[in-house]
Image (cartoon, grey):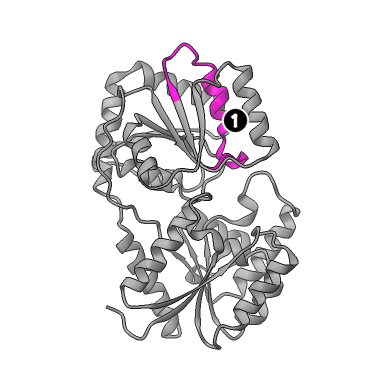
Amino acid sequence: MSTGSELYAVLPATVDDPRVPSGGNVYDRRVCTGLAGLGWRVHEVLVGGDWPYPSPRCRTALAEALAAVPTGALVLADGLVVCGVPEVVLPEARRLRFVVLVHLPLADEVGGHELPLAELDAKERATLRAARAVVVTGLHTAARVVHRHGIADRLVHVVSPGTAPAPLATGTDGATRLLCVASVTPRKGHDVLVRALAELADEPWTLDCVGPVPSSEYVEQLRCDLDEYGLAGRVRLLGPRVGAPLATLYSLADLVVLPSREEPYGMVITEALARGVPVLATRVGGIPEALGRAEDGTRPGLLVPPDDPVALADALRDWFADPERRSVLRSAARERRGMLPSWEWTTRRMETVLHGLKRGR
């Protein structure tokens, strides 16, 4: 066990809120809990706000929280909180050993930006350049941070998400029970999936969509599309699920679908593979990295171009029509299941990065 190690973790206040589950929140909680288990004294600094667009009150609360951290302390800050407010971070970064954890570059979120993308990029760049190190969850994001913001390679560290052990999914009939686990936002591409499924109305599929369903024009249009295509009774927007209810949905799934327009890693993919469930996803961001391959080189799923309902429909049609193909993908998913890194591996990798900063590297 580590001894004498102390860390201040700056996290969104929603990190444990079951109403807003996200891969970033799961990662933050797993790493903080894991470090504490290794003997670190982890002081969690939870800051409320609509990040990365905080109100003046929330910006002030963050500034006060950082000011209260002892000089010279090691700080690991979620980029969602700090990357949009360099005016708050920079004065404190000069006296703290500041590490920024980037789950998703701010400008990579699709839709809903309150600031021009160039301004978001500039804010993030200023924050990251003030940090002693940047931690990212995958090789794709590492490359984007290096080239987009001019951060030196040696300062960017990849600490990939782990995966919790899970029982093998039983599935339903092996083909038709589809599951999409993602917030219903433009970046996640539910609208593309609905258009693809409209072309497959004669197939006996059902789709459960699990994740926050915000009140937005995007969600309103999605519901209209479901009505227009006659799919409202076959596509369920279930809202967020965690724990046993989510595990049950995974267990019943025959195929997990993630039609994202952008994705830094895709923890949903490894969560599916941990249960031996094949995946149909888009070939964007870190998704190919997360999907990986079985030992014989077979992918445990299918990849299609983003924002392409025709390609997505074709892939689904092939999935429904070819039982042998489904069997090969399911076998690859079960083999890949045993190759996934654990959260203990992730925590120890993070500890290595943080210890390097403690030694002044």
Give the left or right position of residue 10, taking residue 107 as reference.
left
Quarter-of-image position of residue 120? bottom right
Left or right of 246, for residue 92: right
**Where does the image place residue 105, in percent across and percent down from the top left?**
59, 56
Q: Where is residue 93 in the image (x, y as percent from the top left)?
A: 60, 80
Amino acid type indicated by mark 1: Asp
Query: In the structure shown, which secondary structural element does the residue marked by tag 1 occupy?
Result: helix
- Residue 111 percent across, percent down from the top left: 67, 44
Q: Is residue 293 left or right of residue 256?
A: left
Report if residue 195 lies within the magenta region: yes
- For label 1, the residue is 191
Label 1: how many Cα within 10 Å (few below 14, some 14–19, many 20+): many
Task: Work out whether 192 lies above or below 27.
Answer: above
Q: How many labels does the image show?
A: 1
Residue 160 in the image, given as x and y percentages of width and height: 40, 58
Quadrant (top left/top right/bottom left/bottom right) for the C terminus? bottom left
Q: Residue furthest top?
A: 202
Look at the image and give the residue range highlighted in magenta. Answer: 183-206
- Residue name at image x 35 percent, y 44 percent: 244
Q: In which quarter of the image is residue 162?
A: bottom left
Between 277 and 265, the one lying in front of the other is 277
